Amino acid sequence: MTTLQPPVAAKPRKARPPAQGDRRSWTGWGFIGPFVAVFALVFLAPIAYSIYLSLFRDQLIGGTQFVGMDNYTQALKDERFWESLARVSLFLAVQVPIMLGIALLIALALDSGRLFGKDFFRIAIFLPYAVPAVVATLMWGFMYGTKYGLVGDINDAFGVTLPDPLSSDLVLASIGNIVTWEFIGYNMLIFYSALRVIPQSLYEAAEIDGAGQVRIVTAIKLPAIRGALVIATIFSIIGSFQLFNEPSILRPLARNAITTDFTPNFYTYSLSFNGQQHNYSAAVAIIMGLITMVIAYVVQLRGMRKGA
Amino acid sequence: MRRKTSRLMRGLAVLSVLALGATACGGSDDDSSGQKPVSADDVQAALKKGGSVTVWAWEPTLKTVAADFQKKYPKVKINLVGERSGDKHYTALSNAISAKKGVPDVSQVEYFALGQYSLTKGLTDLASFGADKLKDKYTPGPWNAVSEGDKVYGLPMDSGPMALFYNKKVFDKYKIAVPTTWDEYVDAARKLHKADPKVYIANDAGDAGFTTSMLWQAGSRPYKVDGTKVSVDFSDAGAKKYTDTWQQLIDEKLVSPINGWTDDWYKGLGDGTIATLASGAWMPANFTTGVPNASGDWRAAPMPAWTKGDKASAENGGSSLALPALGKNKELAYAFVEYANSGAGVQSRVKEGAFPATTAELKNDAFLDTEFKYFGGQKANTVFADSAANVADDWSYLPFQQYANSIFNDTVGKAYVGNTKLADGLKSWQDASVKYGKEQGFTVE
């Protein structure tokens, strides 16, 4: 059949390509039109506008002028920016593996079917995710207090001196603790749902082959949820690079430890709102966006290649 | 065209760069910043005609003033918006001015922040309303802060001559004399902390406003401003006096690392673990409302001196009411500002605990004889008035002090957590301020 058709079909297709081509494309646009409009308005336009902004400089004395790539060269040489990037990179390297590791263990435990009160356990782990980040941070901020907070109470009650979680040495770890608490449930759910779709027949086959539980985990479960692992990792990378809520809310409690350039996002915020340097802030934001994209993409490529 | 787009640009920058929310920002074309002289008759006519005035101010005593004003001029409606204060207030004001939309007709502006707005032509010159003739009504410090040559950018609302508030109960309990010099202060700090390790002479975790006021009192003049020429220098003799003394307190952990205006702070002031507080004369109202349980414990004393017998004082805080250039109903707005800060409003505000910037009130016997129940019946205003008379008026803030203050804890703050010395911290604050000044087009030396 197929060998016969091309000569027949070729002629009419040549004869009326414009009409058919047109109708086809318009119908397609009709479907994606609403999406494209919103996408352009809330995503492309702000990015384009930020790029436009980043090419200017607005000074208290002298007003606005076009400066080309000056803001970018300045940002690339900006120690404060690189320090903040190094800080979130450290955060990423330590916090993300811990968080995803714990989330994976819990997901595997839930999936094993050997847990008593599985539903309660699952919802309890997930619950912190339902608490708004602002509320969670305020709550933790209170607990971290060495004067009148939980840490202070423990110190008083047991006569010990716990290290101050909001000191400049520990504050990053304290923020990591908050973020871990917030997002374990979310990641656990991603892993758990990926585990649930693995066909039972694979387990049966494994049992027949005499595989133990550990072997099943390493040989079946983990390879099967590799996609979910990669996705969760990418989300976590983006989340780490965009760290903002936690430091900004904890800052009033630890002004000397959490500087205005603590994370890249917090730095752009400070530049824009305290320094009125909107243009430079836009340049820093775009550089940060590019870095995040590149790293997330590399992780995705590597993750997928291993999967293949 | 360039100017118009730049305004629109700055307005939109806020939402597009950070995508914090979607607010519409349209560039409106009306340019109402032209300043013709306005006579008193024009103001009276406007008051008769009526209208509304939007006021952004967190000063609590303005509520009564607004009510009284509306009673006197029934056709005028005052919309007092007072939820924001400090940084948030200035962010909102700057954004409104950039976006040319939603700018208030009257705004509270602290003395340290006036420079930034007047420099960028964000404020109306009140001399066009005849405000320059009010000069003699005010004490020199505040007037110096609101005026620049023959221009007047706001009317002083209150002032903050500094005093040392101390918890008498704590000092009596450990039989320690109230310090009159800063050396005695350091001594008292050691004794107090030795007597009870929970007690600290003061809280200080790095506060730009406090540090600059302390430098002011110590005779340091780090900021020199001449139009667009500025200089920053924290290495003069006054600054050294301050850092030498304060470094001892930090090194020996004699100051409690608590930030002001936090829950911990109010608790510390209430339970006697913070024994003194060097602050502006506007503080009593905050004691009454914020630390009610310690009523009767506290007293006010003159600031400790840097050399025995020296009476030099400084200002801490204090604010003015100004008219943003883009505000509307200028005549009504000015009428309200004059009523609140120079007219009948002053008395009603003083009654509610504000500390005035007007000479007449400061010299008034009834004012000086007011007994503060909170301070155990002490006539605290005599202490404050004495301090006000001894404020050196040649201090100036940077035209971008608001930004400089925002990075204080990034730089000087390091000294409070032991990573560096106070003097070095001030040096890096200086460098960062100079860098920003240059970026903003100032000539910095």
Image: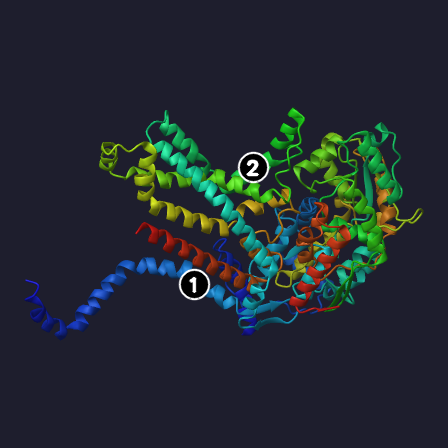
Residue B132 left/right relative to A115: right
Q: x, y (%) of residue B415?
A: 72, 48
Q: Chain of mark 1?
A: A
Q: Marks 1 and 2, how far apart in space? A: 37 Å
Q: Nearer the viewer, residue B165 or B62?
A: B165
Tell me if residue A276 can be seen: no
> Within the image, what quadrant is residue B394 found in?
bottom right
Name the quarter where the N terminus of chain A is drawn: bottom left
Q: Chain of mark 2?
A: A
Instruction: First in sequence, mark 1 or 2: give its number.
Output: 1
Crowding near pointer 1: few (<14 within 10 Å), some, many (20+)? some
Residue B383: assigned label: none
Residue A45: assigned label: 1
Compared to B431, does B248 lie above or below?
above
**Residue at the extreme front of the image, as rendered:** A210
Compared to A4, does A162 lie above or below?
above
Q: Nearer the viewer, mark 1 or mark 2?
A: 2
Q: x, y (%) of residue B112?
A: 73, 56
Residue A140: assigned label: 2
